[in-house]
Image (tube, grey):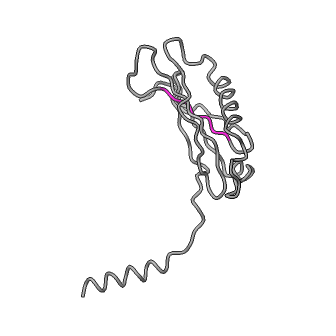
């Protein structure tokens, strides 16, 4: 008798679930810890996201090509982190990925990491650059001054 009652509840509840819009990631904050000892926060606001172009499902490629996103990220990195990380660290491009931000809204997330020249120790310093599909680089803001941890 219990099995039948539980099964009936699941069927009734599943039928009442409304269809919803995809979740939006606008307002999500991305945190970076580059080797300059500061913490940077990058947040994409709703208005800025709404103004950026959609990536239509019928389009093979995003409105902003990967090469252009990489060039914009490199320029932003040099502008924000003036000293480049120091002589004891090697900087490398870790990833360039597409991040879904809601229905037809995407951004590029270009991530850099720094590794000691004499080998890896612990979590490497990192820096994310977020670029909307119209080529707008979302400027990071210094959030906390001081070392990680």
The magenta stretch spans residue 116: no
Q: Is residue 146 left or right of residue 20?
A: left
Query: Where 121 sits versus 71, above or below?
Result: above
Of residue 57 and residue 73, the one placed in the foreground of this image is: 57
Q: Position of residue 47 (x, y in %)?
A: 71, 51
Please identify the quarter of the rendering in which residue 132 is found: top right
Of residue 104 and residue 82, the one placed in the foreground of this image is: 104
Q: Is residue 134 left or right of residue 126?
A: right
Residue at the location (38% across, 79% down)? Answer: 10
- Which quarter of the rendering shows the C terminus? top left
Residue furthest out toward the left: 1
Q: Position of residue 129 (x, y in %)?
A: 62, 35
Q: Position of residue 32 (x, y in %)?
A: 53, 33
Q: Which residues are magenta?
A: 125-131
Of residue 65 and residue 30, the one placed in the foreground of this image is: 65
Query: Where 133 sits versus 20, above or below?
Result: above
Query: Where 59 sits versus 35, above or below?
Result: below
Residue furthest out toward the front: 60
Residue at the location (51% across, 29% down)? Answer: 126
Please identify the quarter of the rendering in which residue 43 is found: top right
Residue at the location (38% across, 26% down)? Answer: 122
Of residue 56 and residue 135, the one placed in the foreground of this image is: 56
- Which quarter of the rendering shows the N terminus? bottom left
> How many numbered badges does the structure rendering display?
0
Judged by its main secondary structure, the magenta piece is strand
Please identify the quarter of the rendering in which residue 79 is found: top right
Q: Is residue 146 left or right of residue 64?
A: left
Q: Is residue 135 left or right of residue 24?
A: right
């Amino acid at each position: 008798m219990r099995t039948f009652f539980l099964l009936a509840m699941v069927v009734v509840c599943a039928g009442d679930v409304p269809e919803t819009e995809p979740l939006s990631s606008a307002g999500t904050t991305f945190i970076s810890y580059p080797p300059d000892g500061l913490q940077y926060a990058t947040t994409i606001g709703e208005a800025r996201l709404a103004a950026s172009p959609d990536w239509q499902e019928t389009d093979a490629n995003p409105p902003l090509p990967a090469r252009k996103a990489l060039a914009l990220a490199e320029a932003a990195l040099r502008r924000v982190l003036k000293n480049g990380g120091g002589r004891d660290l090697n900087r490398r491009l870790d990833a360039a990925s597409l991040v879904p931000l809601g229905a037809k809204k995407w951004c590029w997330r270009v991530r850099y990491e720094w590794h000691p020249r004499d080998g890896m120790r612990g979590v490497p310093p990192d820096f994310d650059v977020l670029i909307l599909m119209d080529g707008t680089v979302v400027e990071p803001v210094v959030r906390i001054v001081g070392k990680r941890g």
